């Protein structure tokens, strides 16, 4: 990849990382209120789930873009479907990729459709990911890494799941 293409890509990865870290900093270190129509829950640093830093996935062969990258689920809804786009950026051969997730979200299930894909040089593939969360999981913010692994390469992206009341903001 040429130097002129490498620089914008790194800037984009750095911007995504800063955006996710800003979300995490607000969620972890600031006291804020979560509102819903029926109740208000005050969450503080002490009560908040500790969240690891979310490093960018640097991969010269393909990008994984999660849409939407952040989802908010009310306590009553325990399922969400997101779309993954895998785009070959510098892939020189066909690569069969197996998809997987990793998170500290207790008891969740993840179902990919399709479960594995073959990415071709210059190609792009859309995959649906449905996450189901069991009842009883505490309200909080849960980062989830989404990994695509092949024989000679791997890459990934992040999904941030916020469980609890649907409106976030300062006290009114």
Image (spheres, rainbow, N blue to C red):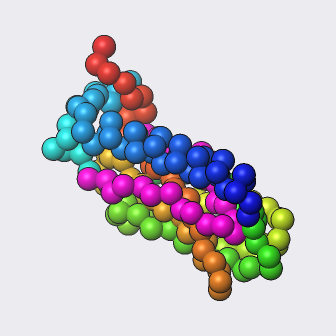
- Residue that appears at 65% across and 83% down: 152
Extreme residue toward the top, this view: 172
Extreme residue toward the bottom, this view: 151
In depth, the one of 145 and 154 nearer the eye is 154
Extreme residue toward the left, this view: 46
Residue 69: percent from left, percent from top: 55, 47
- Residue that appears at 24% across and 45% down: 48
In depth, the one of 101 and 150 nearer the eye is 150
- Residue that appears at 33% across and 30% down: 34
Left or right relative to 93: residue 62: left
Residue 33: percent from left, percent from top: 28, 28
Left or right relative to 115: residue 46: left
Residue 151: percent from left, percent from top: 65, 86
Residue 50: percent from left, percent from top: 26, 53
Magenta-colored span: 50-75
**Secondary structure character of the magenta stretch overall:** loop
Res 90 → quadrant: bottom right
- Residue that appears at 55% across and 69% down: 147
Quadrant where the C terminus sits is top left
């Amino acid at each position: 990849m040429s130097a002129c293409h490498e620089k914008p890509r790194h800037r984009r990865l750095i911007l995504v990382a800063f955006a996710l870290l800003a979300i995490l900093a607000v969620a972890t270190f600031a006291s804020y209120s979560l509102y819903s129509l029926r109740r208000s829950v005050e969450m503080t640093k002490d009560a908040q789930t500790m969240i690891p830093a979310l490093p960018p996935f640097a991969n010269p062969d393909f990008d994984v873009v999660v849409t939407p990258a952040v989802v908010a689920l009310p306590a009553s809804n325990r399922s969400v479907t997101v779309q993954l786009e895998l785009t070959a950026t510098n892939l020189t051969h066909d690569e069969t990729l197996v998809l997987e997730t990793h998170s500290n979200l207790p008891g969740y299930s993840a179902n990919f459709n399709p479960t594995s894909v073959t990415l071709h040089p210059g190609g792009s593939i859309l995959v649906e990911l449905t996450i189901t969360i069991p009842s009883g999981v505490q309200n909080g913010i849960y980062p989830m890494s989404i990994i695509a692994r092949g024989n000679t390469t791997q890459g990934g992206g992040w999904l941030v799941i916020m469980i609890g009341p649907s409106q976030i903001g300062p006290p009114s």
